[in-house]
Amino acid sequence: MADVAIVMGSQSDWPTMKCAADVLGELQVSYEARIVSAHRTPDRLHEFGKTAHEQGFKVVVAGAGGAAHLPGMIAALTHLPVLGVPVKSKALNGIDSLLSIVQMPAGVPTGTLAIGEAGATNAGLLAAAILAIGDDALAQRLVAWRAARTAAVNETPQD
Ligand code: RP5
């Protein structure tokens, strides 16, 4: 049983969504990664959304590109927090993905992160922050992770 489900619309989304997996791994947060396409596997989408809570997931990170309906549809099917990652698309550089995820109707909240790898990394961090509310050891790991990032910033630029 994993705490975080990382769900993506296509195998082609994995290089982006792996950034969420990587940071969750660094923070020792359990996750499962799955391919669930809103358009190509609608039955799988419905099954996942309806059973995500029963499966023990606490947060869903969902990434898709183009007509990126996956995060919003999962949010329509579960009360779990859903963090949407707009994957950079070939045709419109992810602007289509972003707009498809961000503009949800009132009542079906879907968190929306930045386009691409930064968004996936931050979705992983945000999932960890949500879980850390009830997990002091994870909160300490998150604080340490952030402190290490701060410490890595030089005060002056280097040649
Ligand atoms: C979306 O279409 C996926 O999330 C992916 O970002 C995009 C392209 O998918 P592929 O054609 O590469 O499978 O559903």
Image: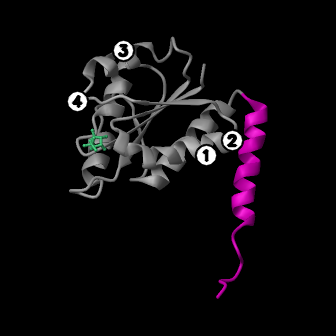
The image position of residue 100, as x and y in percent, is: 26, 42
Q: CA distance from mark 2 to mark 4?
A: 32 Å
Q: Give yes or no for contact between labels 4 and 3 (Cβ–Cβ under 8 Å).
A: no
- Residue at point 44% right, 13% down? 51
| Amino acid marked by disc 2 | Leu
Q: Which segment did they paint magenta?
A: 135-159
| Amino acid marked by disc 3 | Glu
Which tag, 4 or 3, sits closer to the chain's start?
4
- Provide the secondary structure element on which disc 2 rests: loop
| Image-quarter location of ligand 1 | top left
The image position of residue 117, as x and y in percent, is: 46, 53
| Amino acid marked by disc 4 | His
Placement of 34 over or under 97, stated as above or below? above
- Give the main secondary structure, helix, strand or loop, of the magenta stretch: helix
- Provide the secondary structure element on which disc 4 rests: loop
Disc 4 under 8 Å from ligand 1? The reply is yes
Query: What mark, if any, has residue 47 been given in the picture?
Result: 3
- Provide the secondary structure element on which disc 3 rests: helix
| Amino acid marked by disc 1 | Val
Q: Give yes or no for contact between labels 2 and 3 (Cβ–Cβ under 8 Å).
A: no
Q: CA distance from mark 2 to mark 3?
A: 29 Å
- Provide the secondary structure element on which disc 1 rests: helix
Residue behind mark 2: 27
- Residue at point 27% right, 34% down? 69
Residue behind mark 4: 39
Give residue 3's quadrant in the image: top right
Total marks drawn? 4
Query: What mark, if any, has residue 23 been given in the picture?
Result: 1
